[in-house]
Image (cartoon, grey):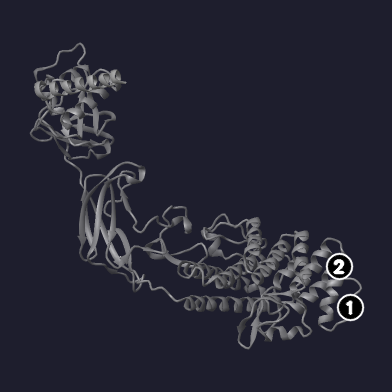
Amino acid sequence: MKKLFCVWAGCLCLLAFAACTDDEGGPDVPPPSKAEESVKEIIDALESQVDDVSDFVDALKTVDVADLQEDRLTVFAVRDAGATVRSASDVLDSVSVRRHIAKGSYSKSQLSDGQKLESIGGDTLYISVDGTDVYVNGVLIEGEGIQAGNSYIYVVPRVLPEQEVPDVPSVHTYETVVRVLDITADIENPVPLDSVLIRTMEGDSLDNMEFVPTDELLIRGGEIVIRHTDPVLEFQLSKPGYSELENGYLLIPEYVPFYDGTLVPYADLNGDGRLDMNDRVNGDVHTYRVDYSTFSTEGQPQICCMKQVQTATIPSMDEVVTAWNGHLLSYLRSTVTVESLLCGAGDAAGSFDYQDVAGLSDTFWKEAYGTLAAAADALEQLTTHYPAESYDRQASILLAAALVRTQLYGYYNVFLTPDAEPYPFGALTDDLNYLEQTLPADEARAACLLAAKMYAYNGQWAEVQDCTRRLIDEGRYSLSADPASVFTQAAGTEIIWGGVQVGSLYVHPLLYREAVLLYALSSMQLGDMMRATDSANQLLAAYGQSPMDYISASSLLELCRMALPGTGALYPYYRLLEGQIDVPGFSAPKNYYLPIPVSVMASNPSILQNPGY
């Protein structure tokens, strides 16, 4: 152990002696400057990546840049002269090479017409651009830049001449007029907006090329002229309390049809001829783009619109629910009225002709999709501000939205997503099955009946029978001994989901009687006439009528006409049972579906009109 300790001590003494020797007798070697490190990276890149520049590399190695602290350089490397002899003005030495090294690092997209660079030798290098060709002091730059660390390298065919003034054509200056209009009060009578900050950038950021911020200016009186040398100009606008976006869409000074047929002042940003969710702007600020390189729009002002941003206040939970209930009440009132007109049943019977079905369809379509938008807004507010305490209300709204989607499919044979695309039938039924599994018991049972209706619309009778059997076998509901009284009360043994008061009556969109009707219909379609007849006779007994020995499609349709008016559910059963509606102008099978609004089809070319329209 003593011997081992002596070995360790001897090693430590040797290390200490070596350290003292370096400190006391060795020369001080300063670290390399930033420029020396950059030049070394540039030399390494030239030797490994560029052919025929050995003369330039040899001269570059003689350049003293120890006092230069620039670590971002742009080098214009000269190709070898080959067998020719350079003229006196083309000599490459440590002096002339300094003219080929500019301070700052510039990608090729950042070299713009009329630009001036300063070399490390004090020379001015003049950049000119002609189409896609870029020149430095009148010498063409070959190919693209090579990045070496923080620097860029370009190859030129000859030594750059000294120049006092640029030997290039006059620089073209573009003029872009930007007008900003305030459309807060009236889109059809906008007014110039004062004191708007505009941030300009030149370059092509949308093609993943670098762009350079150029200025921040204040627009006075709603208009400004921007002069720029690059053919591509991008700019952003800002003003406290104002925005050029509404609901995520860019504002424009005219109304255009949205995917649901409503007119809105929004821009079709992707240029596909239709306005939908794909035209929403990412983020809170839009980047406007003017490009004179692809087509000339000089002299045409860039019109931009802004609106005052309303200060958002958080509504109370009761306020959110009250507002939503207003939308739901309006929609359910519409379904009852539309059912009455289409089927000739109820207070509005006799005041409609199927020749006017397009107008009725347009109104109902907008009402339905407006209700879905209101449901989405209410759910967002409740889940954002009252996630736990509003659970029951959220469940009710989810179920109501599912009802609207189901009714739209029953009326139009299609349901459109917010992106204006047809929602797959399987996805609609999957959503309903998910709601049945996750919602509270009452809403879950309602989702089960909605799923049965959807399966019936698609002719999946085994699935219809399965859904309705679950509701019937549970024994929670029963047919009322006085069917007409169901619509005069908010709750009862027949009401699966509803209880919305309209005047002196209540609207119950989902009643147990419809589950019994669907069970009878599915059993008939599956060939089980005993179950079909037994279910129909239960309904006849509730209405005080004599039982039947054998159920038919026509007799089942008569039961639907008797049991379903006032629910908004009757119309699709004429199609399912191939019945004739006793309303002027009705024609089967054309009028088994409502026509999709023309405005919706105009903005959604992929949507096919229902047959016959």
Q: Residue at x 87, y 71 (%)?
A: 533
Residue 598 falls in image quadrant: bottom right
**Quadrant location, the C terminus:** bottom right
Query: What residue did someone put label 2 on?
Result: 531
Given the image, on which type of amino acid does mark 1 rest?
Pro
Q: How many marks?
A: 2
Q: Residue at x 72, y 60 (%)?
A: 458
Q: What secondary structure is found at the residue carrying circle 1?
A: loop
Please tell me whether residue 79 is drawn above or below residue 262 in the rendered image: above
Q: CA distance from mark 2 to mark 1?
A: 13 Å
In the rendered structure, are the residues bearing label 2 and label 1 in contact, judged by CB atoms less than 8 Å apart?
Answer: no
- State the residue in front, 523 or 274: 523
Q: What secondary structure is found at the residue carrying circle 2?
A: helix
- Name which of mark 2 and mark 1 comes first in the sequence: 2
Residue 67 falls in image quadrant: top left
Q: Residue furthest right?
A: 549
Q: Residue at x 20, y 35 (%)?
A: 72
**Quadrant location, the N terminus:** top left
In this rendering, does residue 579 appear at all?
A: no
Q: Residue 529: horizontal and vertical position, in percent? A: 88, 66
Q: Residue 559: horizontal and vertical position, in percent? A: 80, 76
Residue 330 falls in image quadrant: bottom right
- State the residue in front, 147 or 23: 23
Please tell me whether residue 139 is drawn above or below residue 309 in the rendered image: above
Query: What residue did someone put label 1 on?
Result: 547
Given the image, on which type of amino acid does mark 2 rest?
Arg
Please tell me whether residue 120 is drawn above or below residue 266 in the rendered image: above
Q: Is residue 324 left or right of residue 493?
A: left
Q: Residue 97: horizontal and vertical position, in percent? A: 14, 24
- State the residue in front, 229 or 245: 245
